[in-house]
């Protein structure tokens, strides 16, 4: 058990958080691999923010625990170089400049002052650093929150909805930034409701609904839950349909195309080559992240 805990950057065990009769997080357990971006997904009201607050020690859980690098979060000494956190709001006074806000945070964490300009530059706020935070757009506030989390250059980042309010260019910047950190061996846990963007950013995914875990695994495993589908165009659709059925595929003939379920594009291509069936078009049509996500959460609600 000890080895499993130390191998995970973050381990969550039976985490529960109640507010009176309301169960916001219900016996939640999962782990986050080091050197990965893990997406923490769920519909609004699923308990994502509450869970993240308990995981990083901002909120005390009713039951269960979270461990950072194998150490219970409540027992760990605050270390900005180990764990960086951004959970809305930024906490910056609207009348203060971004630079002064970060200066205060750096002093509290006993971090060098020259780190402030480094993080401002890394998040693209160097030219707006002297402006009052109250004049910032939502996207600029998101960048400031990320800068706050980065002050200690932490090994682990926990981010709550870092893509909110960002334009497409900003979203692309965040994706590139996070992937570069992971390439350096860092770890990121982020919540998001921007599912299409999550599909391009994360390696692993944890899906919760009504505070309960409904899926944990690789992003590729999540999309596969919808099943493999291949769309094919061929001058001999009946011939391809027959051999695909013989190979165990489920086949539907459409106008000018053949839809094959239960086989991936490589399998269909190899089958057509072996059976000498000419292919004019071959394309995968796997279920989207949104389709699988809504299927998972709807099943939980129906239960």
Image (cartoon, helix red, strand yellow):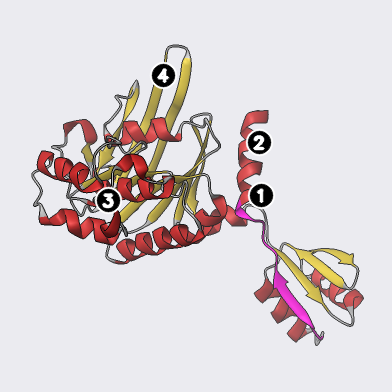
Judge whether residue 281 is colored magenta: yes
User: Magenta residues, as a range?
Assistant: 278-289
Which quadrant is the C terminus positioned in?
top right
Nearest to N terminus: mark 2 or mark 4: 4
Image quarter of residue 302: top right
Are dots 1 and 2 in contact, CB under 8 Å?
A: no
Judge whether residue 161 is colored magenta: no
* Left or right, residue 252 beside residue 119: right
- In this view, the residue in front, 53 or 224, is 53
Classed neighbour count for the residue bearing mark 3: other residues with Cα under 10 Å, few (<14), some (14–19), many (≥20): many
- In this view, the residue in front, 284 or 243, is 284
**What residue is shown with label 2?**
298
Can residue 8 be seen at all in this image of the molecule? no
**What residue is shown with label 1?**
291
- In this view, the residue in front, 44 or 101, is 101
Classed neighbour count for the residue bearing mark 1: other residues with Cα under 10 Å, few (<14), some (14–19), many (≥20): few
How many numbered marks, from 0 up? 4
Discs 3/2, front: 3
Nearest to N terminus: mark 4 or mark 1: 4
Residue 220 image label: none
């Amino acid at each position: 058990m000890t080895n499993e805990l130390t191998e995970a950057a973050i381990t969550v065990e039976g985490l529960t958080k109640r507010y009176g009769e309301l169960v916001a997080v219900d016996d939640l357990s999962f782990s986050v691999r080091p050197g990965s971006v893990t997406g923490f997904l769920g519909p609004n009201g699923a308990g994502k923010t509450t869970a993240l607050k308990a995981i990083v020690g901002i909120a005390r859980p009713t039951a269960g625990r979270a461990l950072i690098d194998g150490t219970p979060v409540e027992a760990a000494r605050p270390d900005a170089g180990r764990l960086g956190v951004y959970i809305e709001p930024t906490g910056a006074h609207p009348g203060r400049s971004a630079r002064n806000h970060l200066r205060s945070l750096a002093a509290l964490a006993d971090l060098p002052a020259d780190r402030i300009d480094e993080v401002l530059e890394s998040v693209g706020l160097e030219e707006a650093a002297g402006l009052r935070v109250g004049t910032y757009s939502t996207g600029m506030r998101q960048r400031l929150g990320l800068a706050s989390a980065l002050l200690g250059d932490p090994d682990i980042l926990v981010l709550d909805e870092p893509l909110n309010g960002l334009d497409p260019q900003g979203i692309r910047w965040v994706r590139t930034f996070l992937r570069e950190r992971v390439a350096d061996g860092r770890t990121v846990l982020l919540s998001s409701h921007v599912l299409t963007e999550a599909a391009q950013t994360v390696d692993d995914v944890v899906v919760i609904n009504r505070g309960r875990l409904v899926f944990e695994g690789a992003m590729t495993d999540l999309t596969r839950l919808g099943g493999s589908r291949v769309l094919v165009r061929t001058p001999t659709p009946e011939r391809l349909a027959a051999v695909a059925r013989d190979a165990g595929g489920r086949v539907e003939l459409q106008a000018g195309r053949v839809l094959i379920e239960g086989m991936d594009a490589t399998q269909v291509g190899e089958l057509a080559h072996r059976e000498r069936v000419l292919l004019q078009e071959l394309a995968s049509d796997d279920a989207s992240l949104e389709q699988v996500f809504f299927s998972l959460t709807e099943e939980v609600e129906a239960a």
